[in-house]
Image (tube, grey):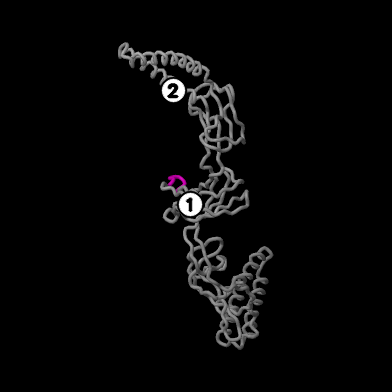
């Protein structure tokens, strides 16, 4: 029966080829070749279908049927993570551009780039000569005021003199003390101090330059407290939550880190339609602010599920199918299985419709038909 089928099909192919070649002109050879290839593909498909039907009705007669070689993988339940992937950048919690608090000419810069500084350390000095002279003058007046106050107090304790004289001396002394205190505060504002401990990353100010309040002077960075900032599509706004596990891949370091989401923004950017996410990074001496990182936030994990390579899932008649291995008599055949995809991540698909122990065809699945004889 099989021989008769092949003979008839071969006659059809040869007749078609001869008819096409005899009627074609040299300019039509390419078109004829394309047509013949299509006919050959269709005939090959018909042969495979007939072989499959023969295998179903009479397994013993399929000994001579040519089996297609395939590779298979036995399925076993495994953990599978659902995540969203995006790109972000490393930032420091303490990345501060220190500015001046008062106006004046810079008279000294005490630090250089790369230098370690402590909290409260003076980084630069603004001209304070006028304030210093005023402080010295007020101190001299305060010494006199204190002396007068002490004498008036002694006299008043002995009931000598008037209360007004005592109160005037006291008021004058306290007024001068407050003026000196105010001048000392102004003098402190001429010193540009580091608000944190860290490393000097940039020195903007120079000696001799005029500086005003708010103008940047020195950048100080503390790299022991870093985070990754990224933007995530609003499609995941209900799935990403504070505390979600995340993995961070820093390409420059060729290192994968695990952390947790520490902040999820509540506002959607109207232009990018994204919301911000922050992940606190583990301590690492090689991390630097503004490094690029690939962030994967895991928002759901299946502890035990069936997973297959996504490329073996085929679309057929608006259905998702894979081929598994079955035994039919003495032959091994491919059996079509309709599956439902629950999620696709890392080129793997979580599917329903397959069971643990099923052997899925992972190589040679292209062009397979339901019931076709295969060889593993």
Mark 1 surroundings: few (<14), some (14-19) or many (≥20) residues within 10 A: many
Foreground pick, 193 / 47: 193
Task: Give the total number of marks visible in the rendering.
Answer: 2
Position of 261 relative to 106 (above/below): below
Q: Which mark is residue 181?
A: 2
Position of 320 with respect to 174 (left or right) is: right
Q: Residue 261 has which mark?
A: 1
Residue 46 spot, x, y in % from top left: 58, 77
Q: Residue at x 67, y 74 (%)?
A: 18
User: How far from the left and from the top, in percent, is residue 284?
Assistant: 59, 48
Where is the N terminus found, in terms of image quarters?
bottom right
What residue is drawn where x is 61% and y is 88%?
60
Q: Is residue 172 above or below residue 3?
A: above
- Residue 169 as seen in the image, left or right of residue 44: left
Q: Residue at x 41, y 14 (%)?
A: 145
Of labels 2 and 1, earlier in sequence is: 2
* 146 sits left or right of 253 in the view: left
Of badges 2 and 1, the one in the foreground is 2
Residue 28, image x, y percentages: 65, 65
Quarter of the rendering containing residue 333: bottom right
| Mark 2 residue crowding within 10 angstroms, few (<14) / some (14–19) / many (20+) | few
Magenta stretch containing residue 270, yes or no? yes
**Could you tell me residue 79's position as x and y percent?**
52, 66
* First to last magenta residue range: 268-273
Say which element carries label 2.
helix
SS state under label 1: strand
Q: Is residue 297 above or below residue 90?
A: below
User: Which is nearer the eye, 354 or 210?
Assistant: 210
Taking the magenta stretch, the answer to whether it contains residue 264 is: no
């Amino acid at each position: 029966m099989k021989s008769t089928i092949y003979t008839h099909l071969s006659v059809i192919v040869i007749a078609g080829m001869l008819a096409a070649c005899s009627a074609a002109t040299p300019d039509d050879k390419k078109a004829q070749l394309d047509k013949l290839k299509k006919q050959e593909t269709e005939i090959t498909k018909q042969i495979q279908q007939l072989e499959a039907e023969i295998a179903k009705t009479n397994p013993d007669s399929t000994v001579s049927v040519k089996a297609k070689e395939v590779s298979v993988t036995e399925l076993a339940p495994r953990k599978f993570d659902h995540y969203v992937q995006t790109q972000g950048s490393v930032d420091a919690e303490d990345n501060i551009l220190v500015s001046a608090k008062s106006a004046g000419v810079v008279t000294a810069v005490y630090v250089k780039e790369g230098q370690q500084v402590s909290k409260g350390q003076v980084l630069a000095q603004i001209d304070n000569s006028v304030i210093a002279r005023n402080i010295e003058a007020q101190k001299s007046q305060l010494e006199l005021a204190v002396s007068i106050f002490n004498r008036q107090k002694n006299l008043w304790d002995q009931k000598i003199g008037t209360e007004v004289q005592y109160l005037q001396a006291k008021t004058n002394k306290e007024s001068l003390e407050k003026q000196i205190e105010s001048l000392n505060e102004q003098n402190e504002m001429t010193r540009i101090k580091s608000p944190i401990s860290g490393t000097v990353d940039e020195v903007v100010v120079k000696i001799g330059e005029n500086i005003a309040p708010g103008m940047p002077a020195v950048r100080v960075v503390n790299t022991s407290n870093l985070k990754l900032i990224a933007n995530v599509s609003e499609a995941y706004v209900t799935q990403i939550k504070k505390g979600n596990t995340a993995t961070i891949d820093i390409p420059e370091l060729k290192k994968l880190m695990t952390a947790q989401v520490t902040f999820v923004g509540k506002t959607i950017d109207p232009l990018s339609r994204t919301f911000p996410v922050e992940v606190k990074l583990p301590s690492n001496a090689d991390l630097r602010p503004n490094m690029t990182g690939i962030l994967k936030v895991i928002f759901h994990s299946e502890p035990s599920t069936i997973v297959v390579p996504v490329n073996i899932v085929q679309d057929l008649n608006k259905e998702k199918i894979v081929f598994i291995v079955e035994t039919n008599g003495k032959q091994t055949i491919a059996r079509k299985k309709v599956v439902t995809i629950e999620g696709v991540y890392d080129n793997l698909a979580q599917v329903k419709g397959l069971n643990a122990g099923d052997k899925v065809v992972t190589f040679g699945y292209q062009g397979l038909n339901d019931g076709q004889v295969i060889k593993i």
